[in-house]
Amino acid sequence: MLKIQTFDARAGGNVIYKALAHPLAAEGISRLYAGLTGPVALYDPDHIADALLALYPAPVDALFVHDVAEVGQTRAGLTTRPLTELPDCGAKTVLIAAFDAARIVDRIAHLPPQGARVATLDEIRLPAEMISVRGKYLDKLNFATNFAFFRDAEGLSTRLVSANYWANYGAGAMRLWLRLFGADGGILATWEQDLPRGAGGFSIDSRAVRARFGLGDFTGQLFIHAIGAAGHDVVKYALDTYASDNGASLSCTHDANAWPSDRFAGLPAPAEGERVVLWLQNSHAVPIPAGTVALDRMGAERPVTLDQEVGPFATVAMDVASLLPGLHWPAQIEVRAGRHVVRPRYEITKGDRTRIAHVNVERDNLKADPGIPGLPAALGRGYLLPFPILPKAQFRSIFQPTPMATTQGNLPVRLDVFDESGRKVAERFLGCLPRDHDFAHDFDDVDVEAGHAELVYDFRDGGEADGWLHGLFRYEDRVSGHAAESSFGAHIFNTAMTYRDEPQSYSGPPPGLSTRLFLKLGDDRRKSFAVLIYPASAAWHPVSATSLQLHDGAGRLIAEAPVSIACSGSAMVWPHKAFGAATLAAAGPAGYVLVRDPTCRLFGYHGLMDAAGSFSLDHMFGF
């Protein structure tokens, strides 16, 4: 496993990691290392050595620290020495592992050996024109970055869609720096794209990129760096995979998680007639050694490794059945990735249709919270995981709880089922499920035509809880056989009282009691839709005060449509029905709908649907 610190749920992302892992930083490191003359001494004032040498191995001969309590520690395979020994170490080069290092250089100017060159990480800084906050290089807004699975091959194309939500936080001119890597990790194209001055929508389509740069078929990854960011250091987007040859395939994934993890979970084993491929995409400029990445049936503790090296920024298709033969749905698979990859996609092929979804970060820093079983009445049902039950006449809806932390040995859960009016129509206690369960619930046995369900904790048979409660939701068209799936985790919703960091807010401290959700628009062939859910852990406002706000490509508000959703209810909304064809046309191809509600926190799922039985679905993102 790479010894890098990536994401901390309390503090957010590790900016040093993102500064080191940037593709342009990788190029800068190559130039820096080429100029090092050995022996090399590394001074580590900011605890960067582990990450630096994990991502970019180098012939470092000695490692120095200034904190006496840290002398004698092991970092990057070296034993730390006191900085006072630097003058006599015989180094020809002293590398200071720090950014904005001028003051550090001045402070220790008398310590390097006579004639030694002093270098710092400022030599690998991004160009000044790519910096959003000039006064502090390691400001998180300087590294608003993410990766996207990006493909234009074999009749399948991808389209990334989002909005310049940074404008709502005071950002001025915004642009994206983009780099497309091919399957072998080679650079296919690098370019920039200006964003609307206001909170307008934008898209990046693989067909347009392919035509612009004269590319052949490609399957790889797109690195995205938002320059000029304010308020948000996360690049959020929806990614459509669609059949560019008029085929039947269609799917959508949402992503906002730019952090490599040791493990991921929520990967389904193949059902009968299915092929499941995990797209393994190296997020770094260092190869993934053969035998590092592994798949394991959840809870089995018998991982099977991929006996193949994955090059820098390369993409490899892992056929699940080749590593875990004989494993079938509803069994679940754990991905052990060693912090080499950002959240991977998986692709399921059945007949002439494919669908893509994503796995989720499996936490390794959680422990059971004894406070959850005894949450006070003011928090009602506490943590809820809401998800749609699509109209039963057309769709089959299936749900599966998914362990999402290495410490989760059991899942004490039940399902509460509500119709669209908010009436509770069923309750299903699922038991205290073991980690290796292969349970899936089909909502055909519930007397509800459409609505939603909520996974909640239920301790009647014992068990433990940590608040990191997740599930996988699968939907199948009864006629066409097309399927889509999504996954997400639980939160506390719509209470005046708070517990730890819940109910979460889009900005600021809890409680989060308002809604800003992004809904893309469709086209002539595929209509956009969303299922909006009003989950409530305890009693809240009887009905929502929701507004569908249609914006054009420049971010201007051009129309609004009200929606009232009952507490614990849901609604399926269609922009073409809410606004009509003429108004949608005025919004333009980069237009979008912002779902706003100042009175409650809604949760939503969005997608596209055509008349031939193809559809997509994933959870919405807010800002």
Image (spheres, rainbow, N blue to C red):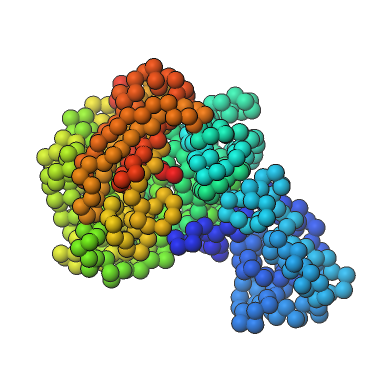
The residue sitting at the right extreme is 115
Q: How many numbered discs, if any?
A: 0
Q: Is residue 194 visible?
A: yes
Q: Position of residue 343 (x, y in %)?
A: 46, 49
Q: Quadrant of residue 247?
A: top left
Q: Position of residue 295 (x, y in %)?
A: 41, 54
Q: Is residue 273 visible?
A: no
Dividing the image into 4 quarters, which one contains the C terminus?
top left
Q: Nearer the viewer, residue 221 or 498?
A: 498
> Residue 213 in the image: x percent, y percent?
64, 28
Q: Is residue 270 above or below residue 365?
A: above
Task: Please report the residue visible at 65 percent of the width from the left and 79 percent of the height from the top.
Answer: 67
Q: Position of residue 559 (x, y in %)?
A: 39, 26
What is the quadrant of residue 135 in the picture? bottom right
Residue at horizontal 78%, vertical 56%? 34
Is 484 above or below relative to 140? Answer: above
Q: Nearer the viewer, residue 270 or 450?
A: 450
Residue at the image position 45 percent from the left and 24 percent from the top: 587
Would residue 10 appear left or right of 398 to someone viewing this image? right
Please say if 245 is above or below 335. Answer: above
Front-most of residues 152 and 85: 85
Q: Is residue 476 above or below residue 243?
A: below
Q: Residue at x 56, y 26 (%)?
A: 208
Q: As rendered, which of 354 and 419 lies closer to the eye?
A: 419
